[in-house]
Amino acid sequence: MTWGTELWDQFENLDKHTQWGIDFLERYSKFVKERLEIEQTYAKQLRNLVKKYCPKRSKDDEPRFSSCVSFYSILNELNDYAGQREVVAEEMGHKVYGELMRYSQDLKSERKQHLQEGRKAQQYLDQCWKQMDNSKKKFERECKEAEKSQMNYDRLDNDINATKSEVEKAKSQLYLRTHSADESKNEYAAQLQNFNGEQWKHFNVAIPQIFKNLQDMDERRTVKLGETYRSFADVERRVVPIIAKCLEGMVTAAKAVDQRKDSAIVVESFKSGFEPPGDYPFEDYSQNLSRTGSDNTISTPKNEVGVKPDPKHSISKTAKNKLWLFGKKPKAPSLEDFSHLPPEQRRKRLQARIDELSKELQKEVDQRDALNKMKDVYEKNPQMGDPQSLQPKISETMCNMEKLRSEIHKNESWLSEVEGKVSTRGDRRPSSDVNHHAPHGRESPEGSYTDVPNQEHRSPPHQPDPRQAHQPDEFDDEFDDDDPLPVIGHCKALYSFDGQNEGTLLMKENEVLYIIEEDKGDGWTRARKQSGEEGYVPTSYVEITMEKNSKGAVTYI
């Protein structure tokens, strides 16, 4: 069923229908445009949401809790999901909306061309009809004039009073009119035949072809719409597998949440390394009061008579202020050696700084080696460059290496101090005198911190009781040994020590001694002077640096 044969007389309606078809195509194009704008806005809002909840952070602020890591993984997956929505919008804009707009312009041009052809054919047929109609009217006029001439001739011919010349003139006029009528008749017949031929061609050839072209155009428009409908769905379907992977990643991130691991991280992050405070002993201030047997007073146990209260467990305002287990932790100034932090946290921070400094040192070493190689090449091939031009850079690199080594050594000393205190505290836990001689500016067993920002201008710490240290049966043989003990490190005296007790060693402030035996947990370190004199010194009075090749090399302050 074709438009050319069935709708030969519906030119105006076909004109309106094809225009409606193009309008509908453009309406669908507008729908696709608004849809892709929604996708673009959605993707932009998703990316802004991800950016809002995943701000830039430093390396130290990287999340470690599994719940946080999973959440940031979900944000990454959501960011990828937003990227897929952008792909959908881009594909819709390129393969659907852009294609529809180009096709719409082509349809408009093609429709205009077909309608112009139809109007031209109609105008040509109208022109033929007008020519035929004019010849018909002329033929009609000529026939009427001929009839008048015939009537005039007949009247004069029958009139006896008419002259011969008048009759001849009427006869001549009749002849001319009759001849003109015959010519008009022939012209009218020719024009009529021509019009009928052109009309047949118009309704049987030209118009069917034009309408067939319009029908083909409209059907192609319909097919194009179907294809774009499919493309519209295919764009969405192509990203479904990737979106499914994003959703699977979110599910995987959700499964990765581990409450036990997070709890362990909390312990690792906030563990101070301190021991819980011990029991406070009863302090009896009534020992000097006289009592009778009838006094209804609490008698002092025999084993407590004459026993001085443990200074560690004496309750004072300072001690009360130190107990912040359930209260607000006092603020401490940030120190270079992190001594304001608990031991465990301080150890981690120092270790991280040492690792960072070691990496920087390795870079400087590599740069020095590269410069030395380049210098050797210049020395062997002077035309390539001046070896002396590299010397300032080499000197600068060496200077940087020395600075880094100094920083590493300083931080290793602090780290050794922390590790030594942690291990010593673990060994002394059964004793009631835990960390009794901790120097000022460092951590106390109760978890408090002093306000001293560095190690300078501090009073000497409390000396350990040498009578409770090494008993003669424990180390007399060591002093009498013919072979001297090997040196395992050195120390620098922070304070003067008189060394009046037996087995102790006199030392002056800033004096350097050799370490021949480590502190075994009693607060004393065995040292040797350069003169060869040996003895014990308070560990808290010296800054100890163990040799790197010695076992368990650490640094105490």
Image (spheres, rainbow, N blue to C red):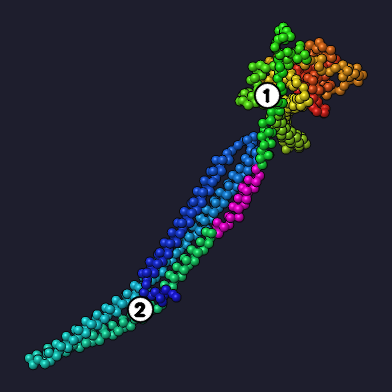
- Judged left or right of residue 249, residue 103 is left
Residue pointed to by mark 2: 199
| Most common secondary structure along the magenta stretch | helix
- Judged left or right of residue 306, residue 108 is left
Task: Report the label total.
Answer: 2
Q: Residue furthest right?
A: 482
Residue at 67% in and 31% down:
270
Q: Is residue 528 visible?
A: no
The image shows residue 294, relative to residue 228, as above or below, that is: above
User: In terms of secondary structure, where does tag 1 sit?
Assistant: loop
User: In terms of secondary structure, where does tag 2 sit?
Assistant: helix
**Residue 479, horizontal then vertical, whole percent:** 88, 17
Q: Could you tell me the amino acid type at mark 2?
A: Gln
Q: Which stretch did the figure color magenta?
A: 234-257
The quarter of the displayed image where residue 392 is located: top right
- For the residue pair 361 and 546, the one nearer the viewer reads as 546
User: Looking at the image, is mark 2 or mark 1 earlier in the sequence?
Assistant: 2
* The stretch drawn in magenta includes residue 10: no
Residue at 64% in and 17% down:
317
Q: Could you tell me the amino acid type at mark 1?
A: Gly
